[in-house]
Structures are given as structure tokens and as C-alpha cells.
Image: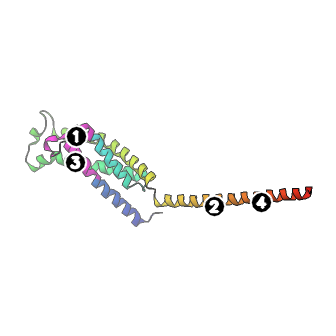
Amino acid sequence: MIKFRERFRILFIVFLLSLLGSLPVAAFYISALFPGYSPLFLGDAGTILILIPIVVGILFGAILGELDLRVIAAGTIVITITASVLITVFIVSPILAGVAQAITATLPNEMIEVFVAQRVMLFVVISFPMLLLGAVVGGVLAERMLPSEQLRQEIEKLRRDTKEWHELLERVGKVREMQEQLRLKSENKDKS
């Protein structure tokens, strides 16, 4: 059973990494959908909207590869929620600051709430599956390339056991060989 302190430490690390992972996801989404407000020229927005969540998910899954897959999936939910909040704040901040009016911020006959909801839902629908896919792939890659300490100990124990079995089989083979030689000698002795 994992102690409370250890659980809290794991929760804190997952939450902190989720917050850190949401920053590039939100930043590249905003840069792709609002290129006029971005210092980066990203080219094709669709590629960025798909690749950045996958890359962040792979890194997130690789860093947390020793944890259970459910924890990694919960972390991707936190990344998605936090990035959605950041995107909403970015879209609504000029209106909240009083720099722009809600009427001129959107298309004619469109309410600001609908405009924000469309952008955030588009983000969630596109990014969450990509984040989850990347996190699972990253977790699997980390498990295969960098096995956990427990897995390494199990592998080392299997190696020792296998070596002992091979040594035992060699001894048994030598004993049988010696028995065969003794039997042949006794047969030769009986014949003579």
C-alpha cells in the first residue's frame, strides 16, 4: 500500500507536470487559430493543432512512465482543462480589460459566449484524444526503453534463476555423461 505522503507527492508531480504541459498546448493552439496575435509563423494550423498535443502527450507519458495508465489519463484531462481555461482567458481578456467591446469582438449576430464555446470545444475535441494517444504511446515507450526499478529487479531475478537452471542442467548433463562412461567401462570390463 502506498503511503499517504507518497500518494500526495505523486499527485503533486502529476498536477504540476499537467500545468506545465498545458502551456505549450494552449500557446500553439492560440498561435494557430489567431495568427494575427502570434509572433510565430506556424504555417499550416491543422498540423500544429494535431502534432503539438501528440508531442506533449508523448513527453508527459514518458516522464510519468512508471505510474499507472489511469494516472497518466487523468493528467491529460488536467492538461486539457487547464489549456481550455487559458484559451478562454486569452479570447475574453480584451473584453474583460475594456479594450474591446463584446459586440465588435465577434461576427455580426454572434454572441461572445457562442464564439468562445466554439473555440474551446474545438480545442477539446481535437486535443484531448491526441493528448491521450501521445500519453499512452509515451508511457509504453518509457516502459520499454526505461523499465521501472521493480521491473529491473524482476528481470535481474529471472536472469539469476535462468543462470542457475543452466548451471544445474550442465551438472545434470555431466553426471549423466559420467554415468554413461561408467556404464560403458563396466560393460567393457564384463566383456573382458
Which residue, given by chain and number where applicable, does mark 4 sit on? 178
Question: Quick check: marks 1 and 4 in contact, CB under 8 Å?
Answer: no
In screen coordinates, is 38 left or right of 4? left
Q: Nearer the viewer, residue 109 or 122?
A: 122
Question: Judging from the image, what secondary structure is the residue with disc 1 in?
Answer: helix
Which residue, given by chain and number where applicable, does mark 1 sit on? 119
Distance between the alpha carbons at the discs numbered 2 and 4: 21 Å
Identify residue type, mark 1.
Arg
Between circles 3 and 2, the one closer to the viewer is: 2
Question: Judging from the image, what secondary structure is the residue with disc 3 in?
Answer: helix
Is residue 121 visible in the rendered image? The answer is no
Q: Quadrant of the C terminus?
A: bottom right
In screen coordinates, is 160 left or right of 92? right
Q: Which residues are magenta?
A: 21-48
Distance between the alpha carbons at the discs numbered 1 and 2: 62 Å
Q: Earlier in the sequence, mark 1 or mark 3?
A: 3
